[in-house]
Amino acid sequence: MSSYTKTSKPIKNLKPKKKKKKKKKKRDPNLPKRPRNAYFLFAGDMRPTLHKTGMRMAEINKELGRLWNELPDERKKGYQEQSEINKKRYAEEMKEYRENNPQPLEESSSDSSSSLSENTIRYLKMQQKKKKRRDRKKKREYIRRMREKKRKMKKKKKQRRSFSSHRRSKHKKKRESSSEGSSGYYSSSSSSEESSFSSSD
């Protein structure tokens, strides 16, 4: 009888492999900086004031998002116009830079002044979702009120119709009863006249 020997498999290393750190790309100092968008221009104006209050960075970002959402359209328009001017200037500078540098180095995302912090982006998205939910809720409430109003109007019309039909039937009965009474009066008077004529004969 042949003996069976179970071969043991080598145990794999369960530790996660360490990810190799990516080398940071060098940034050309002559590369033009990306322009700030309208929100970031507003944040640049308001951030120093909020820093003086002693608020934390997350609280400042949250407050900036709230202030931006509540900012009047006229003031937002000013920041948007300034942002468009900066974009045109950046496009011209990049065109000139590419002409002088055929193979330019890529601009690192960390150096981009137009990039927002994750907390601010998350907060703005949450505010947009809340606004959409509020708008949907208002729309549903408006539709519900309009349906309720129509239902009440239909009910009132029905009540008016039933009331008017009741009045018409009542007047009709009254006229019929009055006509019956007058016909009875005429018949009784005619019979009395006939009896008087017969007695005189």
Image: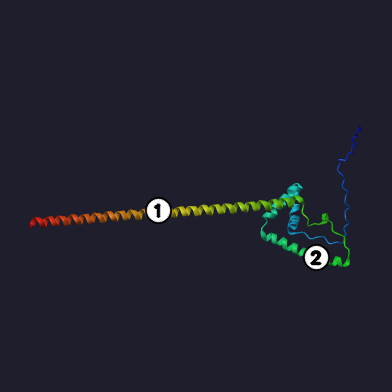
Can you tell which quarter of the image residue 33 is in? bottom right
Q: Quadrant of the C terminus?
A: bottom left
> Tag 2, which secondary structure?
helix
Mark nearer the viewer, 2 or 1: 1
Residue 174 relative to residue 59: left or right: left
User: Does residue 109 show up?
Assistant: yes
Residue underneath mark 1? 162
Please state the horizontal and vertical placement of residue 132, each as a whole percent of the image: 65, 53
Q: Residue at x 13, y 57 (%)?
A: 194
Q: Residue at x 35, y 54 (%)?
A: 167
User: Does residue 53 show up?
Assistant: no
Which residue lies most toward the right here? 2
Residue underneath mark 2? 91
> Tag 1, which secondary structure?
helix
Tell me, for residue 195, which label it has, or none.
Answer: none
Please state the horizontal and vertical placement of residue 17, each as a whole percent of the image: 87, 44
Please state the horizontal and vertical placement of residue 58, each as a whole percent of the image: 75, 48
Residue 9 relative to residue 130: left or right: right
Q: How many marks?
A: 2
Residue 101 relative to residue 165: left or right: right
Q: Quadrant of the N terminus?
A: top right
Which residue lies most toward the left here? 201
Foreground residue among 9 and 163: 9
Pointers 2 and 1 in contact (CB under 8 A)?
no
Q: Residue at x 78, y 66 (%)?
A: 88
Mark 1 residue type: Ser
